[in-house]
Amino acid sequence: MTLKITGYLNKLNLDLRKSNNGRFMDQKVTPDVLSFVADCIINFTSENIEKGFCARDIWEYEYFNKNIRMIFGKPPLKKETMENEYNKLAGQPIKTLEYANILETIKRGRKNYFKIKNFELLEYISIKDKNAYLFLTIYLRKVLSDSGFIKYINEFIKKALNGQITKENFNFLKEKYETFIIGNTKINGKTEVRRIFTKVLNVFSAENNTLGTIKGHLSNRNIYYQDLMYNRINFRDLEKEKGISRTEAKISKKDQKAYEEYNDYLIRKAMNFIKKKYKESEIKDSFGSGPAVYVHHIFPKNEFPEIAHYLENLIKLTSEQHYSYAHPKGNIRIIDKDYQLICLLAKSESIEKSLIQGEFYYSKPSLIFVINTGLNLEDKKKFSNKLTFQAIKNELKTKYKIL
């Protein structure tokens, strides 16, 4: 997908010196918020992809309101004080998507509305936070390269990687950025520029696992993926981010509840995607000819919450396949190991076919992560990302013989 994003953006001229648009990035444009807003736009326009909308349409949308309270812990919109906050949470990511040409502006009188221009990229961003993060790393590099500013970011990152970065280096970069933005865009206040500077620099810092900025100063530690999130809760270490210990990843009861609610949202979003993508069962056995109405977790979500939202762990089944074979006698607390293997083999084929067709929904590393997690494999026995799909299927058959 990296090549697809790069190829699309390379067709554009995103030079800020020509556009004078300081809203290419903003304070609320974090991977989780960007992915969430993209998801809301897709749901809002689900019946008509050509449907125009404004930021208010999105933040007044029931789907937005329901999930933003659950995911980000925001008070209900009925509180007047929240209107401005909701407007920013929807509007700022929309402006970023517009600058990236994923959305386009349509005029209705004096008011700007938007419509989807690149559904494929918007859908990719909507699927999960990590997709939005990958998009931001490519997008920001493109914007700053076209604008002639990337050399300053590259110099900072290079020194940080070599352990040579100083407060003076950081202040130099920050001042350069302030001068550049104020001199070339309509933003003219240093306070606002500094807030956005944090969001820009830390994407590069997280990408390279280097120092960045915290509270406007040079950070005293490396910046990690979870630092980029609007909700900075340790439960986002679902895949054990590099540099974060298990002790640091422990969460409070309050954060545990937040994690569960957030994970429920991710699971629903992933299951809805599988429902839309497959009209028939992914398992072509004698019981797969009926209506495929169930999305089944190959590895149960109550046992493996960390992979419950992975598309690679979800498979479309018929009612008979689901309740007679995946869950013997309809007992959803029981997983039939033989049929679990059949599910994994079929899902592997679905993923391989999807990737061959140039789709971006799945990734082989994510499938490997799901398998290694679901089978509780020790390091020496873990599946390698280098395995071909045929080798994955062969290895699965071998593993299940001894389960």
Image (tube, rainbow, N blue to C red):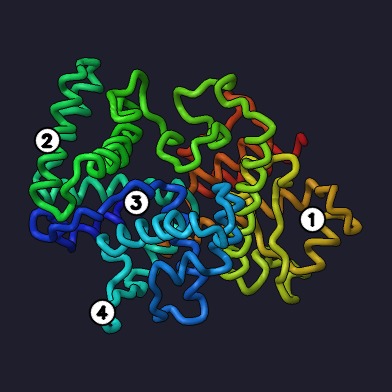
Crowdedness of circle 1 by 10 Å Cα count: few (<14), some, many (20+)? many
At numbered mark 2, what does the secondary structure look like: helix, strand or loop? helix
Residue picked out by circle 4: 110
User: Which quadrant of the figure contains the C terminus?
Assistant: top right
* Three-letter code for the amino acid on which mark 2 is drawn: Lys
SS for dot 3: helix
Q: Is 7 left, or right, of 327 in this rendering?
A: left
Q: Position of residue 147 (x, y in %)?
A: 11, 49
Q: Residue furthest bottom?
A: 109
Q: CA distance from mark 4 to mark 1?
A: 56 Å
Q: Which mark is residue 188?
A: none
Which numbered marker is on residue 176?
2
Q: Earlier in the sequence, mark 4 or mark 2?
A: 4
The three-letter code of the residue at mark 1 reads: Ala
| Residue type, numbered disc 3 | Phe
The residue singled out by tag 1 in the image is 326
Front-lying residue, 202 or 362: 202
Q: Are marks 1 and 3 in contact (CB under 8 Å)?
A: no
Q: Which mark is residue 135?
A: 3
Residue 395 appears at what percent x and percent y? 62, 40
Horizontal and vertical percent position of residue 164: 20, 15
Give the alpha-carbon distance from disc 3 to disc 4, as whole Å. Answer: 31 Å
Relative to 293, say whether 389 is above or below.
Answer: above
Q: Is residue 264 above or below residue 304?
A: below
